[in-house]
């Protein structure tokens, strides 16, 4: 049996076990999803021809490309119905501790973007929900953000302690009001030219006099003259790497809490690196329809969770040293998972498929 066929059969079996109801009602598109996931982990990029090359079907590559296009255009594919049963148990397990919810937007396909809501997981982000949009740059609307947040709220236990993290795109008064209504904390960046109201006076943040090496903490301020949203707190520091002001708005009572949580926002960078240039090469898909980008992301997210599961399992079983240095860790959890899968396939050894790495939340050795 070829490696591609082994991967496909294993992924198909796992998805059938995890999502039996979807298979009974949507067997054809679940079969295509299994083919996509199993091919993505090995494909050299995410062009349709590269994915077709890893599909174990006796058909012309052009036919396999057309099969992908039909699946991406299929309005009957329910992303959330498929992904929610996979990710919800993980969210519930992770919610046993304070849960970082990271909002971010990245360019995807051709002149499109992907708005993602992810949870922090060992210095990287795990995608929980997403939505595609037109335009590779620019801010998403607050309504679009809050629609996504509202959906995520249905997945999170009501008593969970959640901290929303985001850049300036996610600091509008409407967005902050939405986080507050959900009962969640937040730490988001805001623009330097934003007006705040402090002690009854209106002033721009970049006119507060904060320079390199300075830190300013203001309590009970209101954000923007137009909305006067608050009260909230403001921490203004200096970003030495970018040589610019770093203003952060929050509902936390202490600046140390802000300093602790905000850096976790950047855990999206290794996640995007894994699904883009350093991993699956999402950008190479060249898709130009937001709905198709969101649909492709379903297969990517499942493949990503699988590789993280394998990376975690390699550590726990002591096999990570077989695909990484034995004296220190050089490769990411994602890369270790991919390399270990390649090794198992090369040696014709069995390999597990799981899309739920949550049993390993409390089982990592130090430093993972």
Image: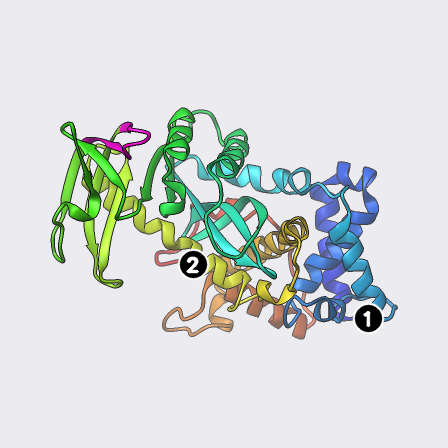
Quadrant of the rendered image containing residue 279: bottom right
Near-viewer residue (331 or 151):
151
Position of 195 with respect to 313 (left or right) is: left
Which residue occupies 43% across, 27% down?
A: 182
Could you say where residue 251 lies in the image, as x and y percent from the top left? 28, 32
Callout 2 secondary element:
helix
Name the residue that disc number 1 marks. 61
Q: Which residues are magenta?
A: 220-230
**Residue 276 lies within the magenta run:** no
> Disc 2 marks which residue?
269
| Quarter of the image that includes the C terminus | bottom left
Residue placed at 60% from the left, 55% from the top? Answer: 306
Residue 314 seen in the figure: no
Q: Is residue 353 above or below residue 203?
A: below
Q: Is 227 left, or right, of 3 in this rendering? A: left
Residue drawn at x 51%, y 47% is: 116
Using the numbered discs, state the Cα–Cα distance from disc 1 to disc 2 in whole angstroms. 33 Å
Q: Is residue 269 above or below residue 61?
A: above
Specify few, some or many for label 1: CA neighbours under 10 Å numbering under 14, 14-19, or 20 or more: some
Q: Quadrant of the N terminus?
A: bottom right
């Amino acid at each position: 049996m070829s490696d591609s066929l082994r991967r496909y059969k294993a992924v198909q079996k796992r998805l059938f076990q995890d999502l039996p109801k979807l298979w009974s009602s949507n067997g054809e598109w679940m079969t295509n999803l299994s083919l996509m996931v199993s091919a993505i982990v090995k494909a050299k990029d995410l062009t349709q021809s590269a994915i077709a090359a890893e599909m174990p079907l006796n058909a012309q590559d052009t036919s396999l490309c057309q099969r992908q296009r039909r699946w991406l255009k299929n309005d009957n594919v329910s992303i959330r119905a498929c992904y929610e049963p996979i990710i919800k148990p993980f969210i519930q397990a992770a919610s046993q501790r304070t849960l970082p919810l990271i909002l971010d937007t990245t360019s995807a396909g051709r002149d499109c973007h992907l708005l993602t809501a992810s949870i922090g997981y060992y210095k990287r982000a795990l995608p929980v929900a997403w939505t595609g949009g037109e335009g590779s740059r620019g801010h998403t609307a607050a309504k679009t953000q809050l629609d996504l947040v509202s959906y995520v709220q249905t997945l999170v236990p009501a008593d969970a302690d959640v901290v929303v993290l985001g850049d300036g795109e996610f600091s509008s008064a409407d967005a902050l009001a939405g986080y507050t209504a959900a009962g969640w904390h937040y730490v988001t960046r805001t623009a330097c030219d934003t007006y705040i109201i402090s002690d009854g006076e209106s002033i721009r943040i970049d006119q507060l006099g904060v320079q390199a090496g300075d830190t300013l903490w203001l309590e009970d301020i209101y954000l923007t003259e137009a909305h006067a949203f608050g009260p909230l707190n403001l921490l203004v520091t200096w970003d030495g790497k970018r040589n610019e002001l770093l203003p952060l708005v929050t509902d936390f009572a202490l600046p140390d809490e802000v300093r602790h949580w905000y850096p976790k926002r950047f855990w999206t960078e290794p996640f995007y690196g894994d699904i883009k240039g350093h991993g699956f090469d999402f950008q190479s898909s060249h898709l130009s329809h937001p709905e198709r980008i969101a649909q492709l992301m379903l297969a990517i997210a499942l493949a990503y969770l699988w590789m993280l599961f394998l990376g975690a399992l390699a550590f726990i079983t002591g096999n990570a040293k077989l695909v990484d240095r034995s004296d220190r860790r050089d490769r990411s959890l994602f890369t270790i998972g991919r390399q270990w899968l390649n090794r198992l396939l090369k040696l014709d050894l069995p390999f597990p498929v799981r899309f739920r790495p949550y049993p390993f939340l409390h089982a990592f050795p130090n430093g993972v």
